Amino acid sequence: MSDTNNAASPAAEETITSYKGFDANWKCRDFQYAVGETFTHEGDVEACRSGFHACEYPLDVFTYYPPAGNRFAIVEQSGQLSRHDDDTKVASKTLKVSAEISLAGMIKAAIEYTVKRCKPVDPESPALSNEDQGAASSTGDQGAASSTG
């Protein structure tokens, strides 16, 4: 008779792909990074306070590092994760700098991020109009709306 362990297997560690900004010398807050390297934070992880930070939505990075004069990378974050409330910034225990990414690459990644989260309109929804007639309205000091059909 074999000895079987019925304990639940530990959950797989979550790894997320994010985008990180650096100065021209691959530094962020006086910490030196390098492409291809993995870094582990010692201590607590809390968004905006401690840990390695990056953003899941590529364009959120520009809030912290403007495009001109800085470098950007695709990173993998894992271990303990802590998410920021105001944007997609995530602090992590472990961060791997996978590859440098250009401004054009950041824009393409932002489009892919957005499209991936789009959901089709329910055909029964009043928001969908594919008939011969359509209507749209706009209110306020400045507004524009168009309708075809």
Image: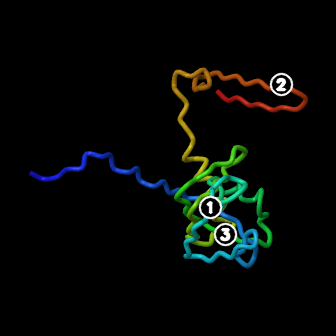
Q: Position of residue 110 (x, y in %)?
A: 64, 54
Pick whichever of labels 1 and 3 is earlier in the sequence.
1
Disc number placed over residue 4 in the picture, else none: none
The alpha-carbon separation of the residues under discs 3 and 2 comes to: 40 Å
In front: 113, or 53?
Answer: 53
Disc number placed over residue 43 in the picture, else none: 1
Q: For the C terminus, which image quadrant?
A: top right
Disc number placed over residue 102 in the picture, else none: 3
Relative to 3, does residue 130 appear above or below in the rendering? above
Q: Nearer the viewer, mark 2 or mark 1?
A: 1
Q: Is residue 40 left or right of residue 1?
A: right
Residue pictured at 61% horizontal, 65% vertical: 41
Query: Secondary structure under badge 3?
Result: loop
Pick whichever of labels 2 and 1 is earlier in the sequence.
1
Residue type, mark 3 in image: Ser
Whether residues under marks 3 and 2 lie with C-beta atoms below 8 angstroms apart, the answer is no
Residue type, mark 2 in image: Thr
Pick whichever of labels 3 and 2 is earlier in the sequence.
3
The alpha-carbon separation of the residues under discs 1 and 3 comes to: 32 Å
Whether residues under marks 1 and 3 lie with C-beta atoms below 8 angstroms apart, the answer is no
Q: Position of residue 136 (x, y in %)?
A: 73, 25
Mark 3, residues whose alpha carbon is within 10 Å: few (<14), some, or many (≥20)? few
Q: Nearer the viewer, mark 3 or mark 2?
A: 3
Residue type, mark 1 in image: Gly
Residue pictured at 84% horizontal, 31% vertical: 143
Q: Position of residue 76 (x, y in %)?
A: 55, 63
In front: 16, or 13?
Answer: 13
Disc number placed over residue 139 in the picture, else none: 2
Residue pictured at 70% horizontal, 73% vertical: 31
